[in-house]
Amino acid sequence: MKLTQFYLPTLRQAPNECDTISAKLMFRAGMIRKVASGIYEWLPLGLRVLKKVEQIIREEMNTIGGLEVWLPHLMPKEPWQETGRWNVYGKELFRLKDRKNSDFCLAPTAEEIITGMIRNEVRSYKMLPLMFYQFGTKFRDEIRPRFGVIRSREFYMKDAYSFHRDEKCAEDYYKLVYDAYCKIFTRCGLKFLPVDATTGAIGGKFSHEFMVVSGKEDNESLAGEEIIVFCKKCNYAANIEKAECVNFSSQVSGVELKKLEEVNTPSVRTVEEVSKFLNQESKNFIKTLIYVSEEVIIDKNKKDFSNTTKSDNKKIFVVLVRGDLEINETKLKEKLGVNEIKLADNDLVKDIFGIEVGFLGPVNLKLKIASYDLKIIADKSVYELKNGITGANKKDFHLKNVNIYRDYKPDLIEDLRNITVEDVCPRCGNGGLNFSKGIEVGHTFKLGTKYSESMKATFLDETGKEINFVMGCYGIGVSRVVSASIEQSNDEDGIIWYPAIAPFDVYLLPIDYKDLDIKNLTDQIYLNLKDKKLEILLDDRDERPGVKFKDADLIGIPVRITVSKKLLPDNKVEVYIRKTKEVRLVLVDKLDEEVSGIIELLKKI
Ligand SMILES: [Zn+2]
């Protein structure tokens, strides 16, 4: 490809809104442009990388028997209603109506559609197992799109769905997919880690997230928003959303319960302020948080609580956690069985309780509006806390020596908090947990019969009995793989591509393409390397060498060949390896061998 016939609008500076290294470099290298918040165009250079990742995935999916299909992006409401996900999915689902006023959504995943596709046609166990996959655009109405294409509203994904006759077959196949995913990410040159994960809105029995972790010493340099916890002793690794907290057992027994006491705490509200004021550690506090579901917030806007029905009453939750710990909203939603939950703001808390949030506590907590039904949900850390401090439900007062069951009774005690460095490993029980940022690039789920049951998708076994398909589903964020790869591999000059997904193999850079000798040799090299199936970007622009070198570094093609006047008499050219910055002077006759050798070598480091 000649650069004068290509489209490579490189930029000296990334737009200010770019919040990650990968977004900055993708803009600067002319890979993507933004259309609207969370919506991007992929330019020719970017698309070449995307297509390479896609092809690696396709090959590995085919190897494990996957069959490629094309499913619609515009999906009718009905199958989504059958599984209940039309209501479950919440605000992230893009919903729209057609001219007849029928409801549709833009695909976030395709379990319903694919289950509908096979349910009346795959009737015999003899046709199983089956795995279908597709590449396509997926949609998610992110509340806050960010990190360029890492968290966007429209993204490119591979999604796959498998159908099995029983649990064992599904589990065996899950392992095959797991191994295929490891091969895919290895072939893409990523440093990654499969971790135990929650199943979220997709549901199912167990799942793994494939997380790209920082390739550098400094974890902060990676743009990941997911936090992964590792055990130093065993090989446990989990998303922080999922990691189970094992109790702090040391505080439980042998503590004398003191007399409940009210203390004046004028104008101090937060745990930090009150702990300073009372000279107490924050871990002696019971933090009281009020969570509400969407419906309550809508009611609040109407300022009309009187019409609240009994079922709505369950949607206000008083959540208690030890003062130094944080509530994990994923765990909370799961334990409460609700889809969306929000921390109530101060105004809403005042509306509901008549008290400021800083003075709330679980002891004799009363509602301003009697029709509400109060549920107190405690994290296990609160169960273990003796003689705690909390709000007195009275302005400018707190309570000391508060004890569970004696002074208040929670409706539910569960593991609801984020794991911390002070916790022990939930698997081996040892201390010494590590935390790291990560970017989720793949996710595998063993679904079981969740979808086949709700959609009545069955086949006949040997005895003629109707059996529900056992399913699995498996996603890879193709566009995310591209940005994760850049996050892992870059320097101050630009991107450093891993050869297997690089947009080109070689950047061919004649110092002066108008010089006939240079042009002749450059063209000869170009044709020769093209014959060897190498992909070449020939910088035939009439630009200063400095501009060409800067662009070559920025777009990060693994090998750069510079054709200059001074090496012509020796019939040599300069070969530069982008990753190692090594320079070699190579005879033109040996060039194809040398370049192929370098590319093979780069795949191993
Ligand atoms: Zn462990």
Image: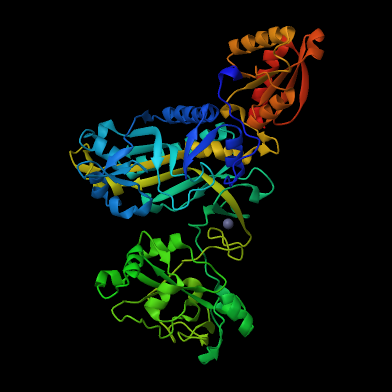
Q: Is residue 304 above or below residue 112?
A: below
Q: Residue 82 or 230: which is nearer the viewer?
A: 82
Please determine whether, in this image, residue 69 is positioned above or below residue 335: above
Q: Residue at x 81, y 8 (%)?
A: 569
Q: Position of residue 227 (x, y in %)?
A: 55, 54
Left or right: 587, with 285 as reference point = right
* Residue at the spot 65% in from the left edge and 19% down from the top edge: 539
**Which residue is at the front of the view, 426 or 208?**
208
Q: Residue at x 58, y 36 (%)?
A: 27
Q: Nearer the viewer, residue 403 or 536?
A: 536
Q: How many marks?
A: 0
Quadrant in the rendering for residue 589: top right
User: In which quadrant is the N terminus drawn?
Assistant: top right
Q: Is residue 204 visible?
A: no
Residue 216 appears in the rendering: yes
Q: Is residue 23 above or below residue 586?
A: below
Tell me: residue 5, above or below residue 61.
above
Name, please, the residue furthest toward the left: 464
Left or right: 518 with respect to 456?
A: right
Instruction: Residue 550 in the image: state x and y as whole percent.
Output: 70, 29
Quarter of the picture for ligand 1?
bottom right
Across and down, in percent, residue 343 comes to 44, 67
Screen quadrant of the C terminus:
top right
Q: Is residue 264 left or right of residue 308?
A: right
